[in-house]
Image (cartoon, rainbow, N blue to C red):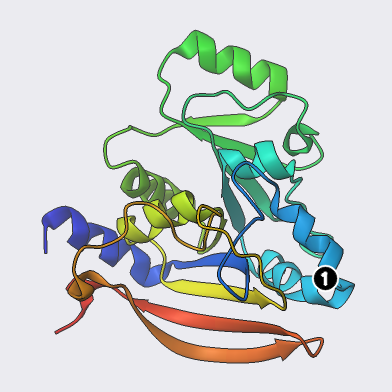
Amino acid sequence: MSALQTKNLLILVNMEVKLLVGVSVDGKVTIGQGRSSKEFAKLLTEKMGQPIRELREWADIIIVSRKTIEYDNSSLKSTSNSKLIRAVIDRNLIIPAERQFFDGSVESIVFTTIQDENEIARYRRERQCVVINIQRENFFNGLTDYLKTKGFDRVMFEGGGNFNDLLLKSKIVNELVVAYFPFIIGGYTTPTLVDGNGISNIDEALRLKLIQSRIVDENLVVNNYQITYRNDRA
């Protein structure tokens, strides 16, 4: 294990990091490229939103990808957790200012790799948010360091297939929460729970340990998995 990986795993000892993903039974996160996951809501009951509400009540901070804000126009608010801080990774500072995320109602953080102070100042002024620069190299390790330094002990991520792939490869998530919605989407190119480049050898597969499974509103299955990374195994 490299020194950087060792440092990252040590940081996680005192910080819980959960990744929530809502998928169809066949593992799709939307009905097509560039489509919003909010379209799933047409087939879900109000009770099926309980897992999301519970995690947002649990978390200190929720972090999503740029595309989640652009495609879903999510506000990321919690009706029961007034202290929840919402954050988005917008590496190139391109999310439009009119998105609900920038409504100014709660504290909002944007993580970027842009270093130009004038550009950061303009973005911050137009959107009334906090902008934090993280170095592009080893971005997620830098993000983890920031979260730990600021005292975020309970971190929640939400995102699409490519974002989830980056998170899991960075080894900063220690629990995966998957909500299996009671319908099938299909499609060769439809985004899935984890996309990216995949693996070339089964030994590279990410190992999961089921730690909880429950049924919500008779039809929604929610599984919580502890993640075991390769360097964690004896």
Q: Position of residue 124 (x, y in %)?
A: 63, 21
Mark 1, secondary structure of its residue:
loop
Image position of 72 (left or right of 111): right
Q: Position of residue 48 (x, y in %)?
A: 79, 75
> Which quadrant of the figure has residue 94?
top right
* 7 and 189: which is toward the camera: 189
Q: Badge 1: few (under 14), some or many (20 or more) residues near its Cα, within 10 Å?
A: some
* 173 and 104: which is toward the camera: 173
Image position of 5 (left or right of 183): left
Residue pictured at 78% horizontal, 26% vertical: 98
Does residue 28 sit above or below 202 in this rendering? above
Which residue is farthest top? 118
Visible residue check, residue 149: yes
Task: Assign the N terminus to one quadrant of the image.
Answer: bottom left
Does residue 46 sit above or below 95 in this rendering? below
> Which quadrant of the figure has residue 220?
bottom right
Residue pictured at 40% horizontal, 45% vertical: 143
Image position of 120 (left or right of 37): left
Task: Assign the C terminus to one quadrant of the image.
Answer: bottom left
Total numbered labels? 1
Q: Position of residue 185 (x, y in %)?
A: 65, 65
Q: Badge 1 is on which residue?
A: 44
Residue pictured at 72% horizontal, 45% vertical: 72
Residue pictured at 39% horizontal, 34% vertical: 134
Visible residue check, residue 82: no
Does residue 64 sit above or below 185 in this rendering? above
Of the residues shown, which amino acid type is indicated by label 1? Leu
Q: Position of residue 191 (x, y in %)?
A: 54, 54
